Each structure stands twice: as structure tokens, then as C-alpha cells.
Image (cartoon, rainbow, N blue to C red):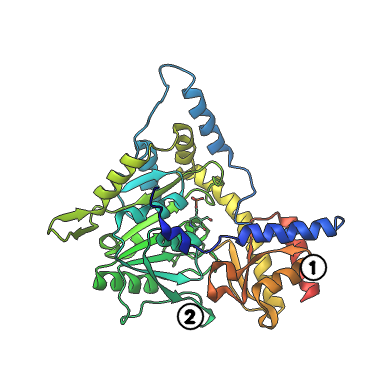
Amino acid sequence: MPKLNENYLNLKESYLFSEIAHRVNDYTAAHPDQKVIRLGIGDVTLPIGSEIIAQLHEGVDALSKAETFKGYGPEQGYDFLCEAIVDYYARNGVTIAANEVFVSDGAKSDTGNITDLFDRDNVILIPDPVYPVYVDTNIMNGRNIVYIDANAENGFLPMPDANVHADIIYICSPNNPTGAAYNREQLTEWVNYALANDAIILFDAAYECFVTDETLPRSIFAIENAKKCAIEFCSLSKTAGFTGTRCGYTIVPKDLKFTASTGTEMSLNAMWNRRQTTKFNGVSYIVQKGAAAAFSVSGMAQCKENLKYYQENAKIIAEGLARKGIRYFGGINSPYIWFECPNHMDSWDFFDYLLANAQVVGTPGAGFGKNGQNFFRLTSFGSRENTLEAMERINKLL
Ligand SMILES: Cc1ncc(COP(=O)(O)O)c(C=O)c1O
């Protein structure tokens, strides 16, 4: 009999979105005439920009001719895409090298797969509430997690505690689910803490494209010395509407090196390269053609048009909550609005209340960790019409 990875027994049932679907289905079955508005989704709704679409078509056409046909590509991504990403970072004032970029099918895979590089015996620091992938992938490997509280008191931006040692630190900024984004000073503190602890920061920048405040860093590598202690994950899912198309990338600096127990120096860049070339065969040429277009100046300008639409929705939601005196986080520099459930309601009770009385669906904060127990997430990815109508209904109800 095979010995199974019994760490899987320690995973909590991932029931958040299935439970939401279940409750919404029950409601709509009982009230077929009611229009339910879904602002719980973390998926984009606008179509991909025409420049990217044109390049996706070009990619397809290339495969139709022997002279331009492409089979297996480089596991790390085609040079043209790695260079386009380097150029995008340079335009945002951050210098990285093409051989530090690893193209993938998305940030979910990479934030999960990165755990391959680390021994089981590490102290993992994870904020609560959090994007559940960080927690579950470490539990699958039997690692010990130390949670750090993100709450209203610290603006959902927990800071390092010099008395707590960590080896691996997860930071997501702008954050899912809370919408909170670290400023330069705060990220500098985290980098200094990582350097002092000989730790690594795993920085998830999946929502960097929503940052409108130019003083906020959009990459951990905007912080001095971060290349000695951080890996960055990013995604085209929200930036370019690639949630279904699938493309992301991970930046592993060449400077990121640690000494093994044998005394040998180990490079994280070389290890990730080895991991990817062993277990991953690259992203399709077609998708990479489209992705490169997204990083071009004009392609990104088109992406920004879509982002503006979502940002306006976020503003509508945030202003609606502010009018009711409801404390909220995010909404600026983020597609997520995270607010306190009225009257300290439990987030699942509030979910039911909002569905029954306003026919609006959001995401209960409890699904992201204990500190989300009395919070609720709305997203800006719905249509303008639905966002306006949802806020009108919420305005009447609360
Ligand atoms: C914080 C965070 N990281 C990563 C991802 C996954 O991104 P991708 O679609 O590139 O796998 C998501 C998607 O919801 C996310 O919220």
C-alpha cells in the first residue's frame, strides 16, 4: 500500500466558494424572480484589449506555417516576453534582468510550487486573513505556520515583530482579500527584518496594476536590498484579463543566495530554474505573444482602460460604504473593498442577510482566516450597472 501524504488530512475543507454557490443556488431556486447581483467574484469580466488579441491571433497564425511553427519553447519563457517584462519594470523604475524572470501559467501555480525549494523545517510567517493558497500549500508539505494578525487596528498591514523569528514570509500587496497596500517605509521595514533574520520574503504582486498612488511601491524590488531577500510573483490575470488565458511570472534575483548545511552556496535562481526545467514545460507560444503585447506601452495603455473601469467601480462601492459610515479598507489601489459587517455581525450571517434583503452576493471574510470573521469583501469586477444597483440596494438596506 502506498504511504500517502497525510498532511492532506490537516487541510481545512476549502468550502468558501462552493458554500457561497450553494447558498445562492438555494436562494435563487426559492426566489426565481429576484435579480441577484454577484460582487463576490475575483474574476475579471471585460474582454481582452485588441492589441493583445491581435498578437494572440499572430501566435496562432505562426503555428500554421512550417517556417514559423513553434514546438517546445524555453521553460523559462521566450526571450521576447522576458525582455518585455524587464522593460515594463524599467518603466516603473525597477531594474531586473531577463534571466531573473520565469514565465509561468500564473501566480497561483508559482506561489504554490515555490514551496519545493524549501525544507520542511522552516518557520513560515503568514498574515491572517490571507489568500488561502499560501496556507494550504505549506500545510500540504507539513510545515509549521506562524500567523501574524492583520486587523483593523493595524490597517490590515501587519508589521514585523523583532521578537518573532521567521524563515519565510508571505506578503501580498495590494492585498487580497483586504485591499490594503504597504507603503515604501513599511516594505523597507519588512526587507530589513528579512535581512536581519536571514529570511526570504515571498512577495505576491498580483494586484500591482491597481496601484494608482505613485508613492506606493508596485514591486518589492523597488526597495533597497530586496534582491538579497525576496522573490516576486506576478500575474497577467487581472492586469490584462488573462484569468482564463493563463500567464504569470516569477522574479528570482541572481543575488538571492544562501549557504547550505554542507557549506555550499545555493542560488535560489538556479534552484527555481532547475525546478521549472524539471517539472514544467513552459507556457504556449500563443499566450506569450499576447502577454508580450500586454507589456508594450500601447498594450498596457489598453489594459489600463479596463483597469480604470474596475477602479471606478471600486470607488462607487467605497463611497457608498463611506456614506453609510461603514469602516472599510482597500478600494483605492485595489479591486477589493473589505468592510466591517454592520453591528459586529458574523460574516456568514451578514452574507445571508445581504442576500435575503438586497440580493447582493459578496464574500464572507471568515473564508480568509479568523481575522476576517466580522468582515466582508466586495469586488469591483462586476459591470457598472450592477455595481451601481448593488450599492443602491445596500444604501437602502443598511
Ligand atoms: C493574491 C493572489 N495571488 C495570486 C492569484 C492567482 O493568480 P493567477 O490567476 O495568475 O494564478 C490570485 C488570484 O485570485 C490572488 O488573489
Labels 1 & 2 near each other (Cβ < 8 A): no
**Where is residue 375 shown, x and y percent of the image?**
61, 74
Going by the numbered disc 2, the residue's amino acid type is: Asn
Q: Nearer the viewer, residue 45 or 218?
A: 45
**Where is residue 297 shown, x and y percent of the image?**
47, 45
Tag 1's secondary structure?
A: helix
Neighbor class of circle 1 (other Cα within 10 Å; few <14, some 14-19, many 20+) is: some
Residue 352 in the figure: left or right of residue 250: right
Tag 2's secondary structure?
A: helix
Can residue 40 be seen by looking at this rendering?
Answer: no
Residue 108 in the figure: left or right of residue 354: left
| Residue at 42% across, 21% down | 68
Q: Residue furthest left?
A: 263
- Residue named by callout 1: 356
| Residue at 56% across, 60% down | 14
Q: Residue furthest right?
A: 33
**Where is residue 108 shown, x and y percent of the image?**
47, 52
Residue 305 lies, with reference to residue 34, above or below; the image says above
Q: Residue furthest front?
A: 1
- Residue named by callout 2: 154
Residue 290 lies, with reference to residue 114, above or below; the image says above
| Residue at 34% across, 74% down | 189
Neighbor class of circle 2 (other Cα within 10 Å; few <14, some 14-19, many 20+) is: few
Question: Which quadrant of the rendered structure holds the C terminus?
Answer: bottom right
Residue 152 lies, with reference to residue 236, above or below; the image says below
Can residue 342 be seen by looking at this rendering?
Answer: yes
Going by the numbered disc 1, the residue's amino acid type is: Ala
